Image (cartoon, coloured by chain):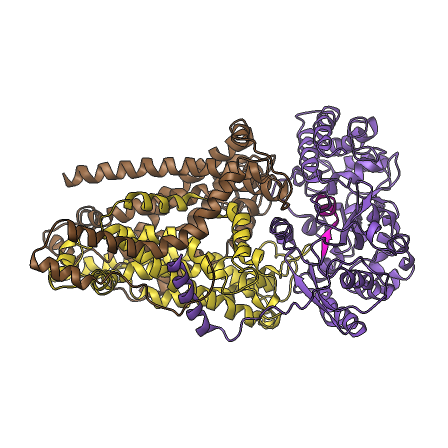
Chain colours: A yellow, B purple, C brown
């Protein structure tokens, strides 16, 4: 009986790992290719057919990429903007989502519908009106000036996602705190947010990535070389007639690292058991 | 709006943690409005902002920022030149948005095909009217590149660097097909085609049917797209000569001497790989291919020849960039002075050393010494024509490209396709008439 | 609005303590309701104000542009043309094709992303050595730049010596000859969809992981003791808990699929002969290549309408299903 169940558990674990390894191979392979190309000596054309293991691996591309025109500065710029955007967006969106999920007031439906509308508007189209707005606000060519635009364009998505999570928190918990005399802010800060750590971590991951990777808006409003963000720095390696792929890939690998670090830090909060029993459908 | 200001405040506070100092505005210029002075005249000061698409990893941008600009600033100690590199693929979008927001810089190194469009939008200074010594510069330029700046009777820019396409060939691939040398005429092309039919190798390859791709064939056949004033295509694009140029491509494609790559679809072997691999015996391309082949296919012996000649001779297409001065510039005198500096012989030679082919015809003889690979291009650029300078060019090119594709696919004859194209292009050009 | 920065200050909210105290004293009805309303506004407004300024205001401007023959130069005349741009869009065969293409992309990518993402999330929602490593590996496609992966997939799907053709023709013999994947409409859309799925599964996986954390472990254990297999436990224990998230993810993915852009732009450029255009690549060309921002804006709002209709339809269906289950 015991041996049978152990064997069965082993089979299940083996199957689980088998599926995971297979998925990992398929999903990570292109990334491996990117890393491998970045280790190849300077090339202007992609190798054809592609090879996974470089013949003479070199870190030259990394040294060049990092050394080229303020790459370190771009890196710091991107990190500051992405961090500020993530904090602001998650704070404002979670408040809005909490409002939509927990309070009844006239116009709530309209406000929420307006936010959902924002999900469906292609932002590329807004670039000229937004540029004119940024000019009126004096936010052209300003690094902090990127933040309100990144926050504004990511609020709809973040609010929409967080609202779905807040709605799962049982109302009885709110009512219990209400009886204890807790105000709206305390119920939000001490109840809703802690119970929604996995959701906050998830949206935080996405918002950080969204700001870190943003290219078109930053390129459009930033002129001063010292105000540039990382995606612009990487795009500058792509030439009109030839692209230094090794450099582009090396720079892309460098650019991915902070996103992975943020992800690893945040995803620790996405685990079952912390909130066991507190939530229900 | 108080709450958004609070949010904004929070954003700034967080930013302050991560930021030491955000570079403030360093623009001290304020001398806008006055007419552009003669070269070298008067005291100049202020900032000149210069947008360009020299790529970050290129020797061009190093030469510009570490040598040319410092030399200029030494001559004009009160002037600061700010170099703003923008990725080529995104420069047009950034320019368009800047036009809408009235936020253009002083000077732009623009692809020659955008100049008429920007001129039509009214954001460029007509240099021939406002720069007193314009003619002096214009006289030194190659005719083809200069004409790309002409829109409705005025010149809105001066060429900064130029290039053109020549025939590049792989002698081994020609040998393998039993052909002695590169095709010199349309007749040679037709004759050689049978040697390449259906064996996985091709006599000629190109990656599409845009103006850049097909115009050398139309012009060399003696045809044209429009009249000299760029007002009508009928009678030019549908002329028997133009049709003959496109028919050459269609016939070679049908014989299997040109690959599917020309249909404009992705997925085929690129010319940059196919030529050195011997899959393609000949291609048309520009001088930048030399460093690319040298780094990627060091064993490949790249050879060049003029564009094969038809009834109209051997005519290629002009590429390159112009430098334009914007109406928005508040420091036109200093900007114009930097423009002149970029067109001086010394600076042009300096840029030639890093792959930017000069526009001054006076330098033609020195060029092969600077870079041997310039020789065939110096020759061809004398017989190279600009794509018709019109703001309608993006749409015109779309029509041309589509119709030539339909001809290649056999859905229309070359004659039908170019007839349809001419009718449609007439309508597009009419929108800008007068 | 000015941009003077005020010191960072947590958005203050109507003092809720008072509400609570009153409430405990048993003051129900309108006063409490009013306080809830005040708190509701106070929580929603800061975010909504930023959203309204950065998104809605420019969107209204764009809507006005779509009703004009818009000249981008400031001061140049931009005459009103009413609904002319929209009328033109409805008769544009390329635009219609671009919507059909996006529809294909949606059908091909959305279910696959949901199913595979959910499967990976379920597999990783357990104490498992190496869990973080797998989570990172699955997330890598999400963080790798679209530009880089689009180029990579272009190579995988190349006609002559591409890996995909090599697998299909030389290794497995499933196909007789090479497929020009990127050279024809439907094969190209298949290739673009494969990229979309590959890039997207990690994204839905993360959201599902977060949703699964809400499933009480005790329920699973109880069901396991009752002899329920993994499938039944998922169906009757996990699924009811993540139904809301599932519907949210579906809506977001449908919206996202109609906004597919960079992969198409880089893999086929909408060609050959406009066969693989999607609404955004087509809109981009009208606006930024041809400078026809009036028409480009009209295309964008038509896209918004289509996506909204789909989202509403979906919302209605999931709502009805949920009430059927609950009732």
Say whether residue B176 is left or right of residue C206.
right
- In percent of width and height, residue B430 lies at 73, 30
| Residue B236 in which image quadrant | top right
Return the residue nearer the eye: B342 or C11. Answer: C11
Q: Nearer the viewer, residue B53 or A6?
A: B53
Is residue A167 visible in the rendered image? The answer is no
Q: Nearer the viewer, residue C99 or C15?
A: C15
Magenta segment: does it hold C219? no
Q: Quadrant of residue A221?
A: bottom right
Question: Do we see residue B39 in this rendering?
Answer: yes
Determine whether, in the image, residue C264 is placed left or right of residue B150: left
The spot of residue B123 in percent (x, y) is 70, 49
Q: Quadrant of the C terminus of chain B?
A: top right
Q: Nearer the viewer, residue A168 or A34?
A: A168
Residue B49 position within the rendered picture, expressed as x and y whole percent measured from the top left:
69, 62
- Extent of the magenta region: B108-117
Q: Is residue B113 magenta?
A: yes
- Give the left or right position of residue B399, taking residue A260 as reference: right
**Who's the residue at 79% across and 28% down the image?**
B243
Labels in figure, total: 0
Residue B42 sits above or below residue C168 on the image: below
Above-or-below relation of B175 to B244? below
Would you identify the image quadrant in which residue A192 lies?
bottom left
The residue positioned 54% from the left and 64% from the top of the image is: A142
Q: Is residue A150 above or below residue B256?
A: below
**C311 to the left or right of C273:** left
Q: What is the magenta segment's predominant secondary structure?
A: helix
Query: From the image, which quarter does the N terminus of chain B lie in?
Result: bottom left
């Amino acid at each position: 009986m015991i041996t049978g169940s152990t064997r069965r558990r082993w089979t299940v674990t083996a199957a689980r790992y088998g599926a995971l390894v297979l998925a990992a191979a398929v999903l990570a392979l292109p990334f491996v290719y990117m890393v491998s190309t970045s280790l190849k000596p300077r090339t202007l054309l992609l190798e054809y057919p592609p090879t996974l293991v470089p013949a003479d691996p070199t870190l030259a591309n990394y040294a060049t990429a990092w050394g080229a025109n303020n790459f370190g500065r771009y890196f710091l710029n991107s990190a500051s903007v992405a961090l500020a955007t993530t904090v602001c967006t998650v704070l404002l969106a979670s408040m809005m989502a909490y409002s939509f999920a927990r309070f009844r007031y006239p116009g709530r439906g309209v406000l929420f519908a307006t936010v959902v509308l924002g999900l469906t508007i292609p932002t590329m189209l807004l670039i000229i009106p937004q540029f004119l707005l940024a000019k009126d606000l004096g936010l052209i060519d300003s690094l902090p000036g990127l933040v309100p635009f990144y926050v504004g364009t990511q609020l709809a998505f973040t609010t929409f996602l967080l609202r779905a999570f807040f709605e799962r928190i049982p109302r009885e918990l709110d009512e219990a705190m209400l009886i204890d005399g807790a105000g709206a802010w305390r119920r939000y800060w001490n109840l809703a947010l802690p119970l929604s750590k996995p959701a906050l971590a998830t949206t935080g991951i996405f918002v950080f990535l969204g700001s870190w990777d943003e290219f078109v808006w930053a390129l459009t409003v930033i002129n001063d070389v010292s105000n540039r963000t990382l995606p612009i720095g990487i795009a500058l390696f792509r030439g009109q007639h030839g692209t230094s792929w090794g450099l582009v890939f090396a720079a892309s690998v460098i650019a991915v690292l902070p996103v992975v670090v943020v992800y690893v830090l945040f995803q620790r909060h996405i685990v079952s058991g912390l909130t066991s029993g507190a939530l229900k459908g | 709006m108080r709450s958004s200001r609070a949010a904004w405040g929070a954003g700034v506070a967080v930013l302050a943690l991560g930021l030491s100092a955000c570079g403030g505005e360093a623009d001290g210029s304020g001398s806008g409005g006055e007419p552009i002075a003669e070269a070298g005249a008067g005291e100049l000061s202020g900032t000149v902002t210069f947008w360009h698409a020299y790529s970050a990893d290129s020797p061009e941008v190093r030469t510009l920022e570490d040598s040319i600009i410092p030399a200029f600033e030494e001559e004009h100690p009160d002037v600061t030149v700010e170099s703003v590199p923008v990725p080529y693929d995104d420069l047009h979008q950034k320019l368009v948005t800047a036009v809408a927001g009235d936020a253009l810089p002083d000077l732009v190194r623009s692809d020659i095909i955008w100049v008429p469009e920007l001129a039509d939008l009214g954001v460029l200074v007509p240099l021939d009217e406002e720069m007193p010594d314009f003619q002096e510069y214009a006289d030194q330029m190659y005719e083809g590149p200069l004409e790309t700046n002409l829109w409705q009777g005025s010149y809105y820019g001066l060429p900064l660097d130029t290039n053109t396409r020549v025939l590049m060939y792989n002698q081994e691939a020609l040998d393998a097909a039993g052909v002695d040398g590169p095709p010199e005429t349309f007749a040679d092309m037709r004759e050689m085609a049978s040697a390449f039919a259906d064996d996985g190798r091709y006599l000629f390859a190109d990656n599409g049917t845009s103006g850049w791709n097909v115009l050398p064939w139309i012009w060399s056949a003696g045809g044209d797209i429009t009249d000299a004033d760029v007002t009508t295509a009928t009678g030019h694009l549908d002329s028997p000569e133009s049709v003959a140029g496109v028919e050459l491509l269609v016939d070679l494609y049908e014989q299997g001497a040109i690959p599917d790559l020309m249909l404009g679809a992705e997925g085929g072997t690129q010319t940059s790989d196919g030529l050195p691999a011997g899959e393609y015996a000949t291609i048309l391309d520009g001088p930048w291919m030399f460093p690319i082949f040298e780094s990627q296919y060091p064993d490949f012996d790249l050879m060049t020849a003029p564009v094969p000649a038809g009834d109209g001779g051997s005519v290629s297409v002009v590429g390159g960039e112009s430098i334009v001065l914007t109406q928005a510039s508040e420091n036109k005198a200093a900007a114009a002075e930097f423009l002149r500096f970029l067109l001086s012989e010394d600076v042009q030679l300096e840029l030639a050393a890093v792959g930017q082919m000069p526009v001054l015809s006076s330098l033609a003889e020195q060029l092969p010494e600077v870079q041997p690979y310039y020789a065939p291009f110096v020759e061809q650029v004398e017989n190279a024509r600009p794509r018709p300078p019109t703001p309608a060019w993006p749409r015109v090119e779309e029509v041309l490209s589509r119709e030539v594709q339909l001809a290649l696919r056999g859905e229309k004859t070359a004659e039908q396709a170019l007839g349809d194209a001419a009718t449609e292009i007439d309508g597009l050009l009419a929108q800008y008439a007068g | 609005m000015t941009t003077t920065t005020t010191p960072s200050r947590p958005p203050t909210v109507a003092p809720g303590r008072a509400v609570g105290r009153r409430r405990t004293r048993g003051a129900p009805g309108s006063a409490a309701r009013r306080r809830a309303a005040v708190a509701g506004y106070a929580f929603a407004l800061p975010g909504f104000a930023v959203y309204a300024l950065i998104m809605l205001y420019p969107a209204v401007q764009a809507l006005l542009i779509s009703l004009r023959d818009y000249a981008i130069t400031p001061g140049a005349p931009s005459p009103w043309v009413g609904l002319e741009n929209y009328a033109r869009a409805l008769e544009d065969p390329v635009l219609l094709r671009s919507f059909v293409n996006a529809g294909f992309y949606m059908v091909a990518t959305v279910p696959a992303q949901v199913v595979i993402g959910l499967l990976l999330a379920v597999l990783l929602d357990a104490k498992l050595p190496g869990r973080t490593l797998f989570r990172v590996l699955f997330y890598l496609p999400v963080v790798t730049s679209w530009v880089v992966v689009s180029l990579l997939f272009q190579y995988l799907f190349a006609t002559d010596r591409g890996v995909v053709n090599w697998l299909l023709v030389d290794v497995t013999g499933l196909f007789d000859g090479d497929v020009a994947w990127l050279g024809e409409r439907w094969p190209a859309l298949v290739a673009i969809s494969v990229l979309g799925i590959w890039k997207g599964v990690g994204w839905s996986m993360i959201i599902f992981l977060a949703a699964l954390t809400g499933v009480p472990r005790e329920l699973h254990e109880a069901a396991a003791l009752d002899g329920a297999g993994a499938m039944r436990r998922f169906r009757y224990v996990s699924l009811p808990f993540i139904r809301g998230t599932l519907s949210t993810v579906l809506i977001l993915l449908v919206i996202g699929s109609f906004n597919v852009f960079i992969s198409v732009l880089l893999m086929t450029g909408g060609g050959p002969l406009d066969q693989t255009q999607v609404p955004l690549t087509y809109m981009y060309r009208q606006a930024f290549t041809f400078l026809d921002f009036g028409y480009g804006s009209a295309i964008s709002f038509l896209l918004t309408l289509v996506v909204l209709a789909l989202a509403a339809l979906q919302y209605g269906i999931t709502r009805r299903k949920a009430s059927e289950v609950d009732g």
